[in-house]
Amino acid sequence: MLQTMPASLLSEWERFYQLEPFGAEADELRLGQISATLVNMYRSKNSKALTASDFLLTVHRPVREQTAEEQFAIFTGMFGNGTKH
């Protein structure tokens, strides 16, 4: 399909996707928003409010930055500490 689609039509679809995302990722985000709304409606006053990202299974999970120490530990685990045996 992409081989026969004019570039102008592909550009139109890309612009449309920027305005109205579609597909599995957009569906999952919408479901996360609905889930967070329902859970937050019935949560206790002392509990933390949840966000849509708390309900995502596959996409849009926030990635925590690794510290330099964590990166060094991973590197050392993969390649050793550089000393010869």
Image (tube, grey):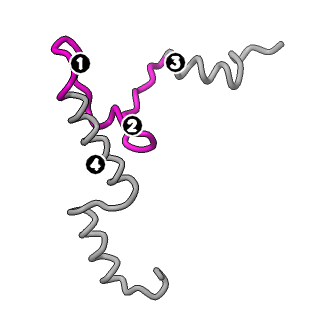
Instruction: Count neighbours of disc 1 (C-alpha within 10 A) and say few if under 14, some if 14 to 19, many if 20 or more.
Output: few
Residue depicted at 45% across the width and 43% down the height: 58
Horizontally, residue 12 falls left or right of residue 41, namely right
Horizontally, residue 34 falls left or right of residue 57, namely left
Q: Which residues are magenta?
A: 41-68
Q: Is residue 63 magenta?
A: yes
Of mark 3 and mark 1, the one earlier in the sequence is 1
What amino acid is at disc 4? Arg
Of mark 4 and mark 1, the one earlier in the sequence is 4
Instruction: Count neighbours of disc 2 (C-alpha within 10 A) and say few if under 14, some if 14 to 19, many if 20 or more.
Output: few
Depth check: give the residue in front, 59 or 10. Answer: 59
Q: Is residue 77 magenta?
A: no
* Residue 2 vertical placement versus 81 (above, below): below
Residue corresponding to mark 4: 30
Between label 2 and label 1, give the one nearer the viewer: 1
Q: How much space separates mark 4 and mark 1, taking CA atoms?
A: 21 Å
Residue corresponding to mark 2: 61
Residue corresponding to mark 3: 70
Q: Which mark is residue 71?
A: none
Residue corresponding to mark 1: 48
Between label 3 and label 1, give the one nearer the viewer: 1
What amino acid is at disc 3? Glu
Q: Main secondary structure of the magenta part?
A: loop
Instruction: Count neighbours of disc 3 (C-alpha within 10 A) and say few if under 14, some if 14 to 19, many if 20 or more.
Output: few
Extreme residue in the front direction: 42
Q: Residues at badges 3 and 4 in contact (C-beta under 8 Å)?
A: no
Number of numbered callouts drawn? 4
